[in-house]
Amino acid sequence: MALREFRDEKGTEWLAWDVPPGREYSQARSRGERRVSPTAGYRPERRVLRDRRRMQTGPGLEQGWICFQSPGEKRRLAPPPPGWQTAPDDALAAFCNAAAPARSRT
């Protein structure tokens, strides 16, 4: 994972790092219930049981992306351009200008 710091033409300081594509995990070993005898007073958990081992990404992000972050905003460029880790700062600023604003998670 590369991490870069640069300033754009307006003087704004940015951090840029790459986010790799999601890992592929194997299927769970067993989908069946492992408990065979009921336990007295047992109450199942209320949380939703789902496979939490894999985080879903939005369309177009399957190959990873570059995250650009300044004190005031965050942007995302997907897929990462080849050689961005060693590109000069002005090229990195051009990539940042081409990046889409990232939505807030809250």
Image (tube, grey):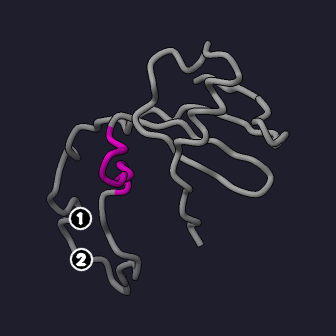
Query: Which quadrant, please, contains the N terminus?
Result: top right
> Which residue position holds label 1?
35
> Which residue position holds label 2?
38
Percent coordinates x, y for residue 100 in the rendering: 51, 51
Write the residue at 20% across / 71% down: 37
Determine if the magenta segment contains residue 5. no
**Secondary structure found at label 2:** loop
Task: Please state which of residues 5 and 20 is positioned toward the viewer in this rendering.
Answer: 5
Residue furthest out toward the left: 32
Up the image or down, 43 lies above or below 75; here it is: below
**Secondary structure found at label 1:** loop
Check contact, mark 2 vs mark 1: CB within 8 A: yes
Q: Where does the magenta region start and end? A: 52-62
Percent coordinates x, y for residue 89 in the rendering: 71, 22
Query: Which quadrant, please, contains the C terminus?
Result: bottom right
Q: Residue 21 got which mark? A: none
Task: Please state which of residues 39 and 20 is positioned toward the viewer in this rendering.
Answer: 20
Task: Please state which of residues 87 and 20 is positioned toward the viewer in this rendering.
Answer: 87
Q: Main secondary structure of the magenta part?
A: loop
Percent coordinates x, y for residue 27 in the rendering: 20, 43
